[in-house]
Image (tube, rainbow, N blue to C red):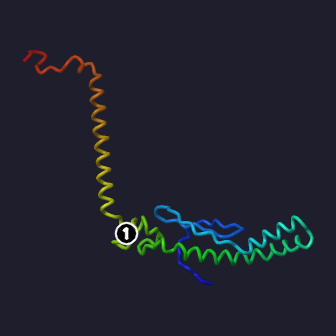
C-alpha cells in the first residue's frame, strides 16, 4: 500500500455514490475540497437495489450479494480515493519543519523564512497590526478622558465656576 505523508485535519464527505474529502490548514482552518470521484461499485449497487425493489427474486438476491461484496471492495476503493485526494491537495499545503503543522501555502506560510507564520510571523504584518492596536488603545484612552470631562461638567463645584483667586482674601 502506498503511504503519503499528510495532515490528519480532514473530513470525509464520501457516500455510496462516490468519494470526496476536505483538508484543512492547521493554522487558519481554511478548507480545500477535492473533486468528486464517482464510485463504479456504488452505481452498480444502486441499480441492483432498484431492480430488487421492483422485481424481487433474483435481482433481490443479487443486491444482497452485491452488498456483501460492496463492503470490502468499497473500503479498498475508499482508501485509493483518499490517497488520490491527498495527492490532489498536498500541493496546497506545506509542513513546517519547526512545529510540524500542515499549513496552507496561500495564507499561513512565510516564504522568506521557510517556516509557518506561527513560527516565523511576517514582521511587516505584525508591525502594521501593532500600530493599529496602539491607535485603537489611544482612541479608547481619549474616549475615557472625554468621559471624565463629562463627569466633571456635572459636578456642583464646577458649575459654580472656577476662581483664580483665594476664597479667603480674594487675591
- Mark 1 = which residue? 110
Q: Nearer the viewer, residue 5 or 111?
A: 111
Q: Residue 117: image x %, image y %?
A: 39, 66
Secondary element at tag 1: strand
Q: Residue 88: image x %, image y %?
A: 55, 74
Please tell me whether residue 60 is drawn above or below residue 153 in the rendered image.
Answer: below
Label tally? 1
Left/right placement of residue 36 relative to residue 153 reads right
| Residue depicted at x 69% and y 78% | 76
Residue extending farthest to the right is 57
| Residue depicted at x 60% and y 65% | 11
Image quarter in which the C terminus is found:
top left
Left/right placement of residue 57 relative to residue 110 reads right
| Residue depicted at x 28% and y 33% | 146
| Residue depicted at x 82% and y 71% | 48
Please tell me whether residue 83 is drawn above or below residue 107 in the rendered image.
Answer: below
Q: Nearer the viewer, residue 22 or 170?
A: 22
Q: Mark 1 packing: few (<14 Cα in 10 Å), some, or many (20+)?
A: some
Please tell me whether residue 130 is drawn above or below residue 151 in the rendered image.
Answer: below
Q: Residue 21: image x %, image y %?
A: 60, 68
Q: Nearer the viewer, residue 110 or 166?
A: 110
Q: Residue 85: image x %, image y %?
A: 58, 73
Left/right placement of residue 36 relative to residue 127 reads right
Image quarter in which the N terminus is found:
bottom right
Amino acid at each position: 500500500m502506498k503511504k503519503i505523508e499528510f495532515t490528519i485535519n480532514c473530513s470525509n464527505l464520501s457516500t455510496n455514490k462516490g468519494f470526496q474529502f476536505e483538508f484543512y490548514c492547521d493554522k487558519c482552518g481554511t478548507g480545500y475540497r477535492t473533486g468528486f470521484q464517482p464510485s463504479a461499485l456504488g452505481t452498480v449497487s444502486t441499480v441492483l437495489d432498484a431492480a430488487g425493489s421492483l422485481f424481487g427474486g433474483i435481482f433481490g438476491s443479487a443486491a444482497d450479494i452485491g452488498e456483501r461484496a460492496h463492503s470490502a471492495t468499497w473500503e479498498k476503493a475508499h482508501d485509493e480515493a483518499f490517497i488520490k485526494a491527498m495527492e490532489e491537495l498536498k500541493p496546497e499545503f506545506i509542513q513546517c519543519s519547526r512545529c510540524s503543522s500542515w499549513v496552507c501555502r496561500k495564507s499561513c506560510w512565510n516564504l522568506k523564512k521557510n517556516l509557518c507564520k506561527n513560527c516565523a510571523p511576517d514582521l511587516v504584518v505584525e508591525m502594521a497590526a501593532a500600530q493599529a492596536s496602539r491607535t485603537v488603545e489611544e482612541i479608547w484612552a481619549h474616549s475615557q478622558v472625554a468621559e471624565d470631562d463629562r463627569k466633571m461638567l456635572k459636578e456642583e463645584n464646577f458649575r459654580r465656576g472656577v476662581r483664580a483667586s483665594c476664597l479667603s482674601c480674594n487675591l
